[in-house]
């Protein structure tokens, strides 16, 4: 019997050695399922306007047999640790080598630790919506009943993004565009 496969939509962000850490994170994630989609890489200023380097963000669709809690607690935490992620308890928006969040999981609403899935912040955050639209424009958000593409259109102008074509992420089989075509 084949295991049930889950669609985990992950948002990756980095502003410390991001050009190395984002591809490394995608490669590590590929060991825990099938990378069915990889977005383009987008650059944005820190959300809180702090004086730190811009972030590079991308989204990945990982088809995995793992449930959300195991993916978060076993896989994502270990990848963040291996890429030297340090959490500042006094500044949740501090610079980071890598941040991986499960922002959508199948079409479910769930809690993993203290985090809600779908992440309620994605509905208004262009840096999250644009990469997600790259891989799943027609995904209908379980809370709002609105497609990701429509949410991005509604949030247009809220935050400036710049595509970083010089940072290529792959699914393990080819380029970003190859992975986008699979989803």
Image (tube, helix red, strand yellow):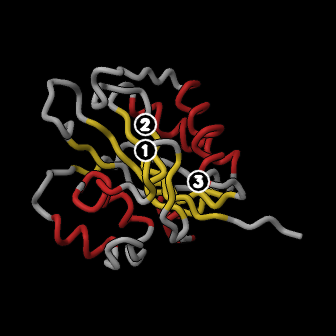
Q: Quadrant of the C terminus?
A: bottom right
| As drawn, 52 above or below 153 | above
Could you say which is closer to the camera, residue 112 or residue 16? 112
Q: Based on the displayed image, in which of its 4 quarters is residue 122 positioned?
A: bottom left
What mark, if any, has residue 171 been given in the picture?
3
Q: Based on the displayed image, in which of its 4 quarters is residue 178 positioned?
A: bottom right
User: Element under label 3?
Assistant: loop
Left or right of 70 on screen, residue 57: left
Left or right of 72 on screen, residue 45: left
Q: Earlier in the sequence, mark 3 or mark 2?
A: 2
Residue at the spot 52% in from the left edge and 55% down from the top edge = 175
> Which residue carries the number 1 mark?
12
Could you say which is closer to the camera, residue 181 or residue 12? 12
Say which of marks 3 and 2 sits in front. 2
Q: Pinpoint residue 18: horizontal percent, then vertical percent.
A: 39, 32
Q: Earlier in the sequence, mark 2 or mark 1?
A: 1
Q: CA distance from mark 3 to mark 2?
A: 18 Å
Could you say which is closer to the camera, residue 142 or residue 11? 142
**View extreme (left): residue:** 157
Residue at the spot 61% in from the left edge and 48% down from the top edge = 69
User: Element under label 1?
Assistant: strand
| As drawn, 141 above or below 31 | below
User: Element under label 2?
Assistant: strand
> Which residue carries the number 2 mark?
99
| As drawn, 66 above or below 113 | below
| As drawn, 47 above or below 39 | above
């Amino acid at each position: 019997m084949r295991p049930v496969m889950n669609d985990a939509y992950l948002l990756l962000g980095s502003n410390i050695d991001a050009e190395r850490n984002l591809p490394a994170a995608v490669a590590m994630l590929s060991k825990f399922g099938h990378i069915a989609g990889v977005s383009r890489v987008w650059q944005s200023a820190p959300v809180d306007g702090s004086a730190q380097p811009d972030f590079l963000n991308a989204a990945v669709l990982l088809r995995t047999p793992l449930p959300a809690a195991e993916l978060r607690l076993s896989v994502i935490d270990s990848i963040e640790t291996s890429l030297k992620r340090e959490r500042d308890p006094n500044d949740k928006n501090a610079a980071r080598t890598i941040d991986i969040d499960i922002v959508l999981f199948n079409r479910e609403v769930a809690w993993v630790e203290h985090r809600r899935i779908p992440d309620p912040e994605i509905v208004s955050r262009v840096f999250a919506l644009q990469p997600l639209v790259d891989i799943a424009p027609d995904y209908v958000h379980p809370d709002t009943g609105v497609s990701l593409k429509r949410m991005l259109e509604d949030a247009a102008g809220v935050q400036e993004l710049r595509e970083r074509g010089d940072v290529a992420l792959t699914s393990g089989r080819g380029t970003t565009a190859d992975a986008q075509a699979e989803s």
